[in-house]
Amino acid sequence: MKAPNKVKVFAWRVIQECLPSKQNLLKRKITENANCPFCNFPIEDCTHALIKCLDTRKVWQRLMPNIYELNAASTILDVALQMLHRGDEGLLSRFFLIAWSLWHRRNKWAIEKVMLDPFQVANNAINTFKPCLQARVEPSYTMHKTGCWQVPPHGFYKLNVDAALFFDLKKAGVGGVLRDERGEMVLAMSKAEHELHDPESVELVAILRGLQFILQLGIRKIVLESDSLLMVEALKANQDSLSLQGNMLKEVKNMMNCFEEKKVQHVCRSGNQVAHTLAKHAWSIPDVELWMGLVPAFLSQVYWLDSQNVRVENTL
Ligand SMILES: [Zn+2]
């Protein structure tokens, strides 16, 4: 789906039904009723808030009339799946972008009691993100800018983490590598995880383990890099998540606060090969392996490739 990252994260949360709708808040005993803050309908779930509530329905009828061919029992997930089956990614992006803007409007009213015009918020979102929806990725630029691992800024250490699922063994592996500003390896770890989580949770476990291993080292400035865009966005988000990973996210955020300066950033897979190789290595180990300073043989090739990039960058 072509959309701004925050809209992608939003779409993911909608599909998991983990937006803090009144129904979800009631389930968690955070509120006393599930009534819609706009129309007082008794159950405000994602579907009601985003497509069925009166004002939002008017927006869809005008901006995307085709989604109203659906029957009254359709949920927001049905709508998204229908668009996916039609194979129209552009429609899906537009759909989630509008839904995202309507959710923003809903929060403005439910939390701040500020009433915004639904058409105005939807049109603003479409106009603001039009370049993003239409963007074409320039392959050479992408290869150069994000294809390589880059050294952290002066005074920082960089932690790259990754995860791998081994369905055959009913286990997962996580890997992490800490390098200094010259690209020298300080610490690498590979750890087997015996509970098989879904792919996104495992990415979060990798971040958690990586931080646990380096917390004792007394490092003050850190760049944390993962190739899981969803987890990176979730970590950057200010509000707490109600998703299944909510508690783990909170724990990771608390750990990040132990550093004086911290950055969380996304790296594409080709820039995260060392951590990826470490995660895959966990397939063959019972629990955990650690390396300090010394690069293990199975890692030497990918590590060498990253250090070639460092040298090229420095001579430019
Ligand atoms: Zn309503």
Image (tube, rainbow, N blue to C red):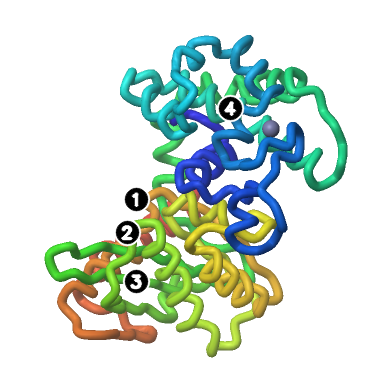
Residue at left offset 50%, top offset 47%: 17
Q: Give the residue type at disc 2.
A: Gln
Q: Give the residue type at disc 3.
A: Gly
Q: Quadrant of residue 52?
A: top right
Do the residues under discs 1 and 2 have CB atoms within 8 angstroms?
A: yes
Kind of element beneath mark 2: helix
Residue at the extreme front of the image, as rendered: 42
Q: Which residue is mark 4?
A: 51
Q: Which residue is mark 2?
A: 273
Is the CB of mark 4 within 8 Å of ligand 1? Answer: no
Kind of element beneath mark 4: helix
**Does the image show residue 195?**
yes
Give the foreground label among 4 and 3.
Answer: 4
- The first of marks 4 and 3 along the sequence is 4
Give the foreground label among 3 and 1.
Answer: 3
Q: Which residue is mark 1?
A: 270
Give the foreground label among 3 and 2.
Answer: 3
Gap between marks 2 and 4, in whole Å?
A: 41 Å
- The first of marks 2 and 4 along the sequence is 4
Do the residues under discs 4 and 1 have CB atoms within 8 angstroms?
A: no
Gap between marks 3 and 1, in whole Å?
A: 15 Å
Q: Quadrant of residue 10?
A: top right
